[in-house]
Image (cartoon, grey):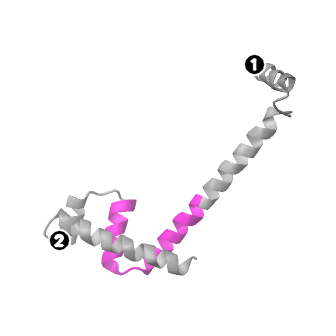
């Protein structure tokens, strides 16, 4: 009811002719579906590139990003001296991953 009132008002003011509001909803749903597909493809690309990394980098990035573990826990499990070492190694691995993604999927 309110929706139709707004459509009539917009058409009356000649701001722009609008069709059925459901047409716009469908377009938005299609955009959301496309965004979901793109996000899923990007995620797959990143996982494929993680598999190309060495075992240490693969484990650190998986623990941090996929398992959402903290740096202290990662440092302990990887037997690093402290969380700062784990942070530094994570940063190096992330840079290596970024380069792989750029090289593989330009």
Residue 75, quarter of picture: bottom left
Is residue 76 toward the left or the right of residue 92 in the image?
left
Residue at 30% in and 69% down: 90
Give residue 103's position: percent from left, percent from top: 51, 81
Give residue 8's position: percent from left, percent from top: 84, 22
Residue 92 painted magenta? no
> Considering only vertical position in the picture, is 90 above or below 66?
below
Q: Which residue is denoted by mark 1 in the rendering? A: 2
Q: Which residue is denoted by mark 2 in the rendering? A: 80
- Tag 2 or tag 1, which sits nearer the N-term? 1
Secondary structure of the residue carrying numbered label 1: helix
Report the magenta residues as a range: 39-66
Is residue 106 toward the left or the right of residue 9 in the image?
left
Give residue 19's position: percent from left, percent from top: 86, 34
User: In terms of depth relative to the viewer, which is nearer, 46 or 3?
Assistant: 3
How packed mark 2 is, by other alpha carbons closer than 10 Å (few <14, some 14-19, many 20 or more), is some
Residue at 33% in and 79% down: 55
> Considering only vertical position in the picture, is 22 above or below 60?
above
Q: Quadrant of the C terminus?
A: bottom right
Q: State whether residue 77 appears in this view.
A: no
User: In terms of depth relative to the viewer, which is nearer, 46 or 24?
Assistant: 24
| Figure label count | 2
> Considering only vertical position in the picture, is 15 above or below 53?
above
Q: As drawn, which residue projects farthest toward the front?
A: 14
Residue 35, quarter of picture: bottom right
Residue at 65% in and 49% down: 32
> Considering only vertical position in the picture, is 67 above or below 16?
below
Give residue 53's position: percent from left, percent from top: 39, 79
Is residue 31 toward the left or the right of residue 43 in the image?
right
Residue at 77% in and 39% down: 24
Assign the magenta stretch its main secondary structure: helix
Residue 61 painted magenta? yes
């Amino acid at each position: 009811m309110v929706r139709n009132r707004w459509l009539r008002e917009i058409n009356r003011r000649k701001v722009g002719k609008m069709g059925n509001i459901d047409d716009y909803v469908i377009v938005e749903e299609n955009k959301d579906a496309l965004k979901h597909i793109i996000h899923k493809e990007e995620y797959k690309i990143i996982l494929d590139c993680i598999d190309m990394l060495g075992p240490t980098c693969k484990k650190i990035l998986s623990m941090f990003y996929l398992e959402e573990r903290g740096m202290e826990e990662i440092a302990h499990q990887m037997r690093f001296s402290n969380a700062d070492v784990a942070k530094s190694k994570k940063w190096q691995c992330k840079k290596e991953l970024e380069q792989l993604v750029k090289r593989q999927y330009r």
